[in-house]
């Protein structure tokens, strides 16, 4: 009987997983499900305690799910190519199946795997549209290798063929050897965000179902309301592949409401950033479009921003939510990022690094390219827009409930005063103990305009 390795990477699920489905030949042959915990991921700066904890949960859940199908997860620690080649030899595997992934790191991993397996006569089979709904490079404008603007991409993306979702296998047959190493350890609780969400396909499917049943229809009206917190919070599940983007797109199309269409559009943003990064892997570090910025060096201001002590309540609320949950609402991500790059004039890379150190959904394509979008060095067609944190707060947190939740110093201040605490009487300000604004917005805007040569 043929043995194939299913190498799990960012597809930690049983349902709608083309890699697992193909490796088991729809349940007819033997499959060895494998996950390799590669120290290279840590060395490349992608590992962060919140994501390691979520990964641990995902692997534990996957192993439980595989046991339920008569199989198990084989975990190895070490360089992925070396470990997989060794496992293939031990198990007598003829093929290794893996999801195609397009970051520079993932491509280098694929090359190393191909070389190591080729030497042993084992075939490497990659599967597209596992990590994203539409594969990077499968829709391109004429004369270019990727779309640089979202709206024309969305038009083509919406018409692109979508594969059918696959069911979870009913049963799997797995050889008894080789044995598994223990799971990568879950970091200590005190290294984690205290309100971190649990990981794994079981939890992700529960959350997805509940959210679709209750909230998707209102998504277009409510996704920016900071205090209501009605977005799906499926981003970590999508990042680790506990849920399939393809399945979510099908589900949104089936719902057919304006809310579901708005949600589908966000999934298209996710694919959009992946196709930009696939074509321009250096955009993880370098400006996608240089604006010749000369970023300020102000470590004290960077630290105040990281700590949520800028004196701008909405910015501080977002940064404190990030620390507490390892997640932040999208509107708050935009406001806090704009504040760092455009108001303080600090390099987007410093902000992206801090986000990646905490975000449980921290993702090179989505994080770096959203940061570049906000900094105006990316794909935004209005690169000089600046989000005013007070105007944004009054619009998206009108009664101040989001700020009150995350900035306890301001808990007894009503709206709209809560968004401009520097206007409160000096005596009350002293009592509250909330920081004074780090910069004046008018002066900061003038400085930004002059830096970009807009005057
Ligand atoms: C500065 C900045 C950094 C970001 N860093 C990340 C990151 O590291 N990882 C990440 O997944 N998202 C990132 N985002 C995008 C977005 O903020 C999150 O995907 C979203 O807030 C996750 O919450 P949700 O699952 O409730 O989203 P929902 O509103 O429910 O959207 C559904 C899904 O669509 C995708 N999505 C939504 N908005 C975007 C977007 N702007 N770009 C790409 N995909 C999107 C996500 O996968 C999300 O789970 C960033 C945005 C900004 C402005």
Image (cartoon, rainbow, N blue to C red):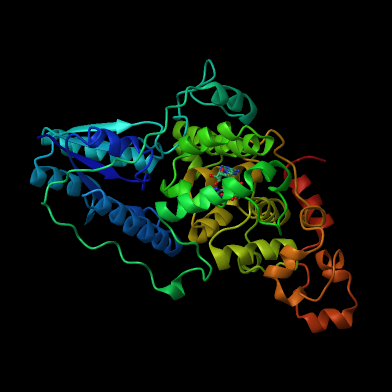
Q: Quadrant of residue 312?
A: bottom right
Position of 31 with respect to 164 (left or right) is: left
Residue 347 in the image: above or below residue 314: above
Q: Is residue 77 visible?
A: no
Q: Quadrant of the N terminus?
A: top left
Residue 381 at x, y = what percent?
69, 33
From where the camera sits, is residue 16 visible? Answer: yes
Q: Residue at image x 22%, y 36%?
A: 27
Q: Quadrant of the C terminus?
A: top right
Above or below, comparing residue 90 to residue 280 in the picture: below
Q: In percent of the image, x 51 and y 57: which residue is there?
A: 359
Residue 16: image x %, image y %? 38, 38
Q: Nearer the viewer, residue 435 or 407?
A: 407
Residue at 88% of width from left, 79% of height from top?
Answer: 426
How many numbered markers are drawn?
Answer: 0
Name the outermost residue toward the right.
425
The answer to which image quadrant residue 278 occupies is top left
> At 58% across and 49% down in the image, what residue appears?
211
Q: Is residue 422 above or below residue 361?
A: below
Front position in the image: 383 or 252: 252
Q: Nearer the viewer, residue 167 or 287?
A: 167
Placement of 176 over or under 407, stated as above or below: above
Q: Quadrant of the rendered structure where residue 401 is?
A: bottom right
Q: Is residue 59 left or right of residue 254?
A: left
Q: Position of residue 115 (x, y in %)?
A: 19, 36
**Residue 96: image x %, image y %?**
21, 37
Extreme-top residue of the structure:
142
């Amino acid at each position: 009987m043929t043995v194939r390795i299913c190498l799990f990477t960012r597809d930690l699920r049983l349902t709608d997983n083309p890699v697992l489905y193909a490796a088991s030949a729809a349940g007819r042959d033997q499959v060895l499900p494998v996950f390799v915990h590669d120290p290279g991921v840590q060395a490349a700066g992608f590992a962060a305690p919140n994501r390691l904890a979520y990964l641990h949960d995902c692997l534990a859940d996957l192993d439980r799910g595989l046991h339920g199908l008569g199989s198990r997860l084989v975990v190895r620690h070490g360089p992925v190519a070396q470990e997989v080649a060794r496992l293939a030899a031990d198990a007598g595997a003829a093929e290794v199946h893996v999801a195609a992934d397009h970051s520079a790191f993932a491509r280098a991993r694929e090359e190393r795997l191909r070389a190591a397996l080729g030497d042993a006569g084992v075939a490497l089979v990659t599967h597209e549209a596992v990590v994203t709904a539409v594969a990077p490079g499968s829709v391109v404008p004429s004369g270019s290798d990727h779309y640089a603007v979202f709206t024309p991409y969305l038009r083509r993306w919406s018409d692109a063929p979508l594969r059918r979702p696959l069911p979870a296998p009913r049963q799997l047959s797995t050889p008894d050897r080789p044995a598994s190493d223990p799971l990568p350890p879950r970091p200590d609780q005190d290294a984690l965000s205290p309100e971190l969400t649990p990981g794994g396909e079981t939890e992700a499917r529960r959350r997805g179902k509940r959210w679709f049943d209750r909230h998707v229809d209102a998504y277009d009206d409510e996704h920016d309301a900071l205090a209501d917190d009605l977005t799906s919070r499926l981003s970590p599940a999508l990042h680790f592949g506990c849920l399939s983007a393809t399945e979510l797109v099908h589900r949104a199309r089936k719902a057919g409401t304006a809310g579901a269409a708005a949600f589908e559009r966000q999934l298209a943003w996710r694919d959009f950033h992946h196709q930009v990064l696939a074509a321009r892997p250096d955009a993880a570090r370098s400006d996608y479009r240089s604006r010749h910025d000369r970023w300020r060096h102000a470590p004290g201001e960077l630290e105040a921003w990281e700590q949520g002590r800028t004196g701008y309540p909405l910015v501080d609320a977002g940064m404190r939510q990030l620390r507490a949950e390892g997640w932040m609402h999208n509107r708050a991500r935009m406001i806090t990022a704009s504040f760092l790059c455009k108001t303080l004039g600090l390099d987007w890379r410093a902000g992206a690094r801090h986000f990646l150190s905490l975000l449980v959904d921290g993702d090179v394509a989505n994080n770096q390219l959203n940061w570049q979008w906000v900094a105006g060095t990316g794909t935004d067609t209005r690169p000089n827009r600046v989000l005013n944190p007070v105007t944004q707060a009054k619009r998206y947190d009108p009664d101040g409930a989001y700020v009150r939740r995350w900035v306890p110093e301001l808990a007894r201040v009503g709206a709209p005063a809560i968004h401009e605490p520097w206007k409160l009487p000096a005596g009350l300000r002293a009592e509250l103990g909330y920081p004074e604004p780090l910069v004046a917005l008018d002066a900061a805007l003038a400085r930004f305009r002059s830096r970009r040569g807009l005057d």
